Image (cartoon, grey):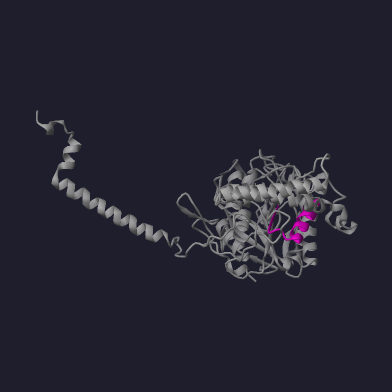
Amino acid sequence: MNESENISLHGRGLLDRRNFMRNTAFSMGGLGLAQLLAAESEKPSDFSGKSPIRPTIDPDNPYLPRKGHMHSAAKQVLVIYCPGAVSHVDTFDYKPDLYKYHGQKPPGLPAVTFEGPSGNIAKPFWDFKPRGECGKMTSELLPNLGNLSDDFCYIHSMTTQTSAHPQGENFMNSGFTMEGFPSFGAWVTYALGSDCEDLPAFVAINDPRGLARSGKNNFGNGFLPAAFQGTDFNAKNPPSNLGRPEAFTAGDDKKTVDLLKRLNANHLEKFPGDANLAARVASYELAGQMQMSVPEMMDLSAEPESIHKEYGTDEGSDLKKEYAKNCILARRLIEKGVRVVQLFNGSDPSGGNGITNWDSHSNIADTHAMQAEIMDQPTAAMIRDMKRRGLLENTLIVWATEFGRMPFLQGNGTGRDHNPSAFTCFLAGAGVKKGISYGESDEFGFKAAVDPVEVYDFNATILHLMGLDHERLSYYHNGLERRLTNVHGHVIKDVLA
């Protein structure tokens, strides 16, 4: 038998001289391409042509303060987040045509929206009036916040990519509708670290009623090192597991901590470069420091009676009292130098239809009023107090929600459906123009009409105000240079002071 008959067709093809030359040429080309890509990867850049900037982080001390990419007035940021979607047309976005067309259904408006058939145009459920020297028209639903309009920069042309709450929260707080991406606070602390040695760099103060719809995604670290996730607690529920057992004295506790430090240091020497291990060690050491600092931070009785009265901790509903205490806690954390504080007003992973958050698909007159009673006075008091103490000179305040609500009622005639095409957020404090409004929605507040702002732009602007270039702040993950704004976003220069 001829030996060649035992060779497969594929094997014979490899022995063919022409096939051999062709495969060799392809292989050499592939090797050349690989070499070019390898050389390019040494100086990575994204579509903008800018080289990524990854902060140099000491894994043993991940919270050490780091410089930003540019000078900025804002060194800290306080995010006030309202889950459930606050109705812009009932709060800050005054639309006279809603009164003109009340009870009618003008052409061009959709017959069906997120939760079903739409009803007729509805005027605001609360009257609007001019506030402050700027004369900003805001509603009686949030009069205390409205009275601070001279300090605010309203953005009325916000748009988002989704009309679902979990995805909307993810998008606003992490830049992606999907789960698993780092939150805004994680990005900032990854970039800048913290000036506060005995408190977390990033604190999430959850609503007294619990977590928001998207849960810990709103303040998670995603694929960033674990050290940069938010630490969640509030005035009612301090961080757990910080208490010392009664059988141990303070001296015993100190000896234990010192021994753990030595053991951890030895362990890190054996496993250098293990970011997860370093993050755990750093968190344990921070927990030890928090045993001393947190009890003092949580003791709101040290605040004068005038502060409690101003914030409203002793009047109104129990939820309002607890939220007011959270506002005092937020101010105290900023005062101590915590880099990022995220304060939630609203909760409930399963919805709530306006009872536990701002999601008012029915009875909006009652449900929005209930949320406003909780949020308005304490939040306004916190901002006034921070201004009085000079904290707004280096603190950026962000007030946000995931989308807006429709200018017409739902089929039930008592609620407003989700509106991703227009909503309002506002900025205040360091680096932001005061007493202005940017962008406009259309005559009904249905769609962004003038200078539309995407969530990418909003986040790019906040990072810029913190001294960070959103196009360059990155983290290499799964073969991609990831960033908060993905490959999108433009800084809204007209709102910068």
For residue 65, side relative to residue 241 (left or right) = left
Q: Is residue 172 visible?
A: yes
Main SS of the magenta part reads helix
Q: Is residue 339 magenta?
A: yes
Q: Quadrant of residue 68?
A: bottom right
Nearer-the-camera pick, 323 or 448: 323
Q: Residue furthest top?
A: 1
Q: Quadrant of residue 441?
A: bottom right
Nearer-the-camera pick, 51 or 97: 51
Query: x, y (%) of residue 25?
Result: 22, 52
For residue 141, side relative to residue 50 (left or right) = right
Q: Residue furthest right?
A: 305
So how many labels did they put on this image?
A: 0
Q: Quadrant of the N terminus?
A: top left
Query: x, y (%) of residue 458?
Result: 59, 59
Query: x, y (%) of residue 224?
Result: 57, 51
Q: Residue at 14% of width from left, 47% of height from top?
A: 18
Q: Is residue 281 magenta?
A: no
246 relative to 491, above or below = above
234 relative to 428, above or below = above
Q: Quadrant of the C terminus?
A: bottom right
Nearer-the-camera pick, 418 or 308: 308
Magenta residues? Answer: 325-342
Nearer-the-camera pick, 267 or 360: 267
Query: x, y (%) of residue 123?
Result: 69, 52
12 relative to 168, above or below = above
